[in-house]
Image: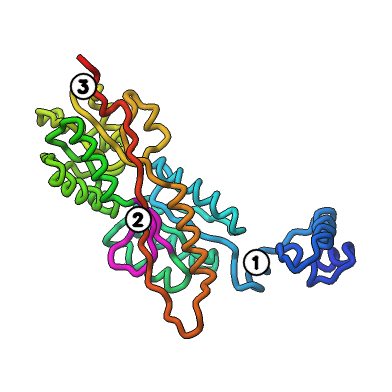
Amino acid sequence: MPTTTIGDVARAAKVSTATVSRALSGSTAVNPDTAARVREAALRLGYRVNPIARALRKNATGNVGLLVPSVSNPFFTMLVDELEQHLVGTGMNLYLCTSRDDVDIEAKRLASLCDGAVDGILVSPCDAARSGPALVGAHQQVPVVQVDRSAADVDIDWVGLDDMHAMDAVVAHLAERGVREIALVTSNAQNSSGRLRTVATRAAGTRHGITVSRVLDGTFSPDWGAEAAAALVADGPLPGAVVCTDDQIATGLVRELQRLGVTVPDDVLVTGLDDVPHAALLTPSLTTIRQPVSAIAAEAVRLIESLLHPHAEPGVSPRTSLRTAMRGELVVRDSTRRTER
């Protein structure tokens, strides 16, 4: 069956091929009635725009890459959804891939995205110390914006949670509950979020008169939360509260504490961070920090758009990278509400 060409559409709509091209690209330079006639002819004839040819003509793909450490973590699922929604309004498509928390895989994904697949990249680096070189290399080819996590010593835009404010809100809340000693269950090995939240919790403890008696370092996962809970119970006695630097850790920790006969919140208070959908469904429901995911996504899209379509005046030096920290909201639920006895 012969392939329908742009010339066929032009003849059917009684316009030039240039008008067809402009109409199907969404150009406002085409009269609305003419554009509608072109779209009707294209649909009737089964004409499809060749994305490769269009990219070559425009020197742009219309695609933005998104590279995250994992989609099994509900926070990144939320982030992907919000980014996709905000990109819809720009007319750009989203290409999603994961690094599986592996810096070598991350570097390969970045190189693949830069090889003509996308115009820009949104990335949550998996390793604060080692992701930098690949990010810099990618940024030399296409605009890059870091989202949520960041790599150290790179001059690349970043937008994410204000971790210092988040942990201060958690510790201040526990101080109001009369807690004087906490254990911190976190993930410092690779990602920037875990490291910042650990530093922030220690600093908040000093401000609010709470001792951080133990720091247990693992991964952002329910399995690590369960392992940390078992270690805390085995070492005993339990502190007044356990602060977890994400809801995944908190989920595993609460379940294991319950299995071991420890009651939350009567025996120990527990907090998380992110406010993923299941945080409110746990028993007890989880006190946590709600990340401003929609606002973070909107700002990330705005930043990538500003890099893709700069409006700098002639002779003005390119701007320095921007770091935008957004405040979360403390959501108090049953895991820090002791029942009356």
Q: Secondary structure at mark 1?
A: helix
Q: Which mark is residue 266?
A: 3
Amino acid type at image mark 2: Ala
Number of labelled discs? 3
Residues 135 and 264: in front is 264
Q: CA distance from mark 1 to mark 3?
A: 62 Å
Ranked by sequence position, the earlier of labels 3 and 2 is 3
Instruction: Give the residue at x 58% y 57%.
Output: 93
Based on the picture, tell me whether residue 190 belongs to the magenta stretch: no
The spot of residue 159 in percent (x, y) is: 39, 57
Q: Tag 1: residue type? A: Ile
Up-down relation of residue 111 to residue 149 (above or below): below
Quadrant position of residue 317: bottom left
Element type where label 3 sits in the image? loop
From which residue to which does the magenta span run? 145-161
Quarter containing the N terminus: bottom right
> Quick one: 185 or 103, which is closer to the camera?
185
Q: Is residue 24 left or right of residue 261?
A: right
Picture coordinates of residue 220 (x, y %)? 30, 43
Residue under label 1, please give it. Answer: 52
Which is closer to the viewer, label 3 or label 2?
2
Looking at this view, name the residue that lies furthest to the front: 176
Q: Is 103 situated left or right of 176 in this image?
A: right
* Quadrant occupied by the C terminus: top left
User: Distance from label 3 to label 2 (Cα)?
Assistant: 35 Å
